[in-house]
Image: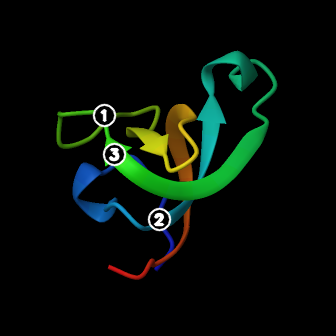
Amino acid sequence: MAGNGTIRSEIKPGLEVDIVLKQDQRTGKRTRGIVKDLLTNSPQHPHGIKVRLQDGQVGRVQNIVGGGNI
């Protein structure tokens, strides 16, 4: 399952995703991790759904890498 991260219903805790951290928005550098919490409440967001990873980093989803063990 690969997605672009702009639709909230496609993102669930446990998914492996690539995010862009706030400080990396200019460069577009991506960080990979496992979703812990969804922070965006709207059904979709043009810049990506904001999530918190299991390691505590917060950013907007740019790519869904794969399904987790839910």
Q: Which residue is mark 1?
A: 39
Residue at 53% in and 33% down: 59
Q: Is residue 43 above or below residue 33?
A: above
In the rendered structure, find residue 3 and report the number of the disc placed on it. 2
- Tell me the kind of residue under disc 2: Gly
35 sits to left or right of 25: left
Question: In this figure, which colouring scheme has been used for the structure?
Answer: rainbow
27 sits to left or right of 57: right
Mark 2 residue element: loop
The image shows residue 42 at horizontal and vertical percentages of 18, 34
Determine crowd level at label 3: few under 14, some 14-19, many 20+ residues with C-alpha closer than 10 A: some
Residue at 75% in and 18% down: 26
Q: Which residue is mark 3?
A: 37
* Image-quadrant location for residue 31: top right
Residue depth check, mark 2 versus mark 3: number of the one nearer the observer: 3
- Pick the front one: 55 or 41: 55
Quadrant position of the C terminus in the picture: bottom left
Mark 3 residue element: strand
3D distance between C-alphas at marks 2 and 3? 18 Å
Residue depth check, mark 1 versus mark 2: number of the one nearer the observer: 1
